[in-house]
Amino acid sequence: MDFAEFVDIMPELEEKFKEEFLHRVAQRTPVRTGALKAGWEWDEQGDSLYFTNDVEYAIFVEQGTSKMAPRMMVGTTLLEVDDILKQVVKEVIG
């Protein structure tokens, strides 16, 4: 694969990466009402890409509190970024 071909598949790689990252975080998200799990989304601002959740208690579930252990839905998934990238490249390129 030459550079031009790689550039052509970049949008597909990015989309599949975002889908898989979101899927893994959502799988790890505890559900009481479903709002937290449904709140995960990607936010593109210029050249930057952010993974967000507007549910006000998301940070407390992620990082824990003095009375609740952290769930680390995003933190754990961040540790898997290399695996996600390898999986996505394998799916797209073969």
Image: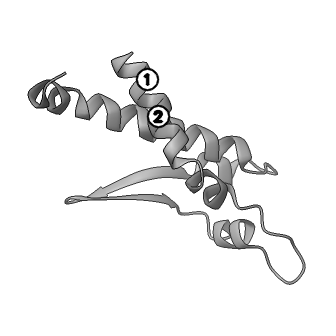
Residue drawn at x 12%, y 31% is 3
Q: Badge 1, how many Cα within 10 Å: few under 14, some, many 20+?
A: few
34 lies left or right of 25: right
Residue closest to the far bottom:
66
Which picture quadrant has residue 47? bottom left
58 lies left or right of 40: right
Q: Is disc 1 placed on a helix, strand or loop?
A: helix
Q: Amino acid at mark 1?
A: Lys
In percent of width and height, residue 7 lies at 15, 33
In percent of width and height, residue 90 lies at 43, 23
Residue closest to the far top:
94
Q: Which mark is residue 90?
A: 1
Q: Which residue is mark 2?
A: 86
Q: Which mark is residue 61?
A: none
- Residue in the foreground of this view, choosing between 64 and 9: 9
Which picture quadrant has residue 26? top right
In percent of width and height, residue 42 lies at 42, 51
Q: Above or below — where is 83 with respect to 79? A: above
Marks 1 and 2 close (CB-CB < 8 Å)? yes
Q: Amino acid at mark 2?
A: Lys
18 lies left or right of 13: right
Residue drawn at x 61%, y 57% is 74
State the quadrant of the N terminus: top left
Q: Is disc 2 placed on a helix, strand or loop?
A: helix
